[in-house]
Amino acid sequence: MGTLGSEAYRFLGALGSAGHLPAAEGDYIGADGRLHCGKCGRPREFRLPCNGRYVSCRCGCDDAMLERERQADRLREEQERVREMQRYSLADERFRLATFDRFRADGPEDRRVLDLCRNYVEHFDRMYAAGAGLLFRGRPGTGKTFAAGCIANALMARRVPVLVTSLVRLTAEGDGDALNRLLPKMNAARLMVLDDFGAERDTEFKAEQVFSVIDARYAAKKPMILTTNLDGFTSVSDPRRRRVYDRILEVCTPVPMNGESRRLKEAELLRGEIRPLLRDGAAEPAMDEQRRTRPDERRAEGSTV
Ligand SMILES: [Zn+2]
């Protein structure tokens, strides 16, 4: 039986390994006599001062891998929490069908919006880091919801946690406590889309709730995309609204949607097709004419019957 000191000494003496650690492909022994990582060049082992034996240490690759794992865990956690928000989600048929391949960019106005939406998705990491959002403004039917939906769907396809909802829905439960419980979960979403901002009832209490949603997002520096029919975002003087609008305008880039109303265009197109029928009551010639022109040509010439 040795003394405590000699036991400890034996224990320390056996720590580590006598030779180099097993090398991975590309690893090499550096000028310092230690095994270095072939990928990042940093040492993968060091020698214990007490016995000169080798023990492993983390090279940069391990750190990068751990960071990637941590990132993936964070994303999973966020997705989980966003899923809990399901019943506040507006992910209905209209949103499900909003995808870039269905985006009809007929004119320069549409193409401008399409490019902007694609760029937002492409550079979302930077948008997220900067807390940068968008504010789609325009008359009803100009495709604001569709544009926001395209962004949301493209990001969700990349596993980015996105919450698509509206203030009407978020504040439907009435009491402020319910909303306060929602706010942290809401912010687990990397992007929050608030459809039809300004459609909520205009009461003191609602205004307070709307402010807390926008402010929570703002304070967390997380991006949001809003769609709204409201005019006068910049000119409103009511201080209660001013406070909310200012927050929004500070973090969301306004995207005016001046394009010809999408719904009107659809209706015009339909009218263009049925007008000859109504006018002449002659179905045959009109149908023949349609067969000769491709649908996109018909769309381009509009309904000048
Ligand atoms: Zn390495």
Image (cartoon, grey):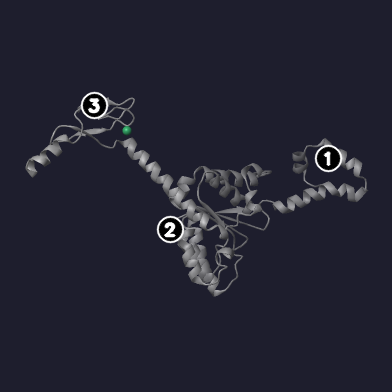
* Above or below 18: residue 190: below
Task: Please state which amino acid type lies under the numbered disc 3.
Answer: Gly
- 173 relative position to 267: left or right: left
Mark 2 nearby-residue class (10 Å; few <14, some 14–19, many ≥20)? few
**Mark 3 vs 2, N-terminal side:** 3
Q: Is mark 2 within 8 Å of ligand 1?
A: no
Nearer the observer: mark 3 or 2; the answer is 3
Q: Where ligand 1 lies, by image quadrant?
A: top left
Mark 1 nearby-residue class (10 Å; few <14, some 14–19, many ≥20)? few
- Please state which of residues 145 and 177 is positioned toward the viewer in this rendering: 177
Task: Please state which amino acid type lies under the numbered disc 1.
Answer: Gln
- Please state which of residues 274 and 81 is positioned toward the viewer in this rendering: 81
Q: Which numbered disc covers residue 30?
A: 3
Q: Residue 147's x, y, as percent?
A: 61, 50
Query: Could you tell me if the residues under marks 3 and 2 are in contact, i.e. CB atoms within 8 Å?
Result: no
Mark 1: secondary structure: helix
- 258 relative position to 305: left or right: left
Q: CA distance from mark 2 to mark 1?
A: 54 Å
Q: Is residue 283 visible?
A: yes
Nearer the observer: mark 2 or 1; the answer is 2
Question: For the point 49% across and 46% down, which residue is it?
Answer: 124
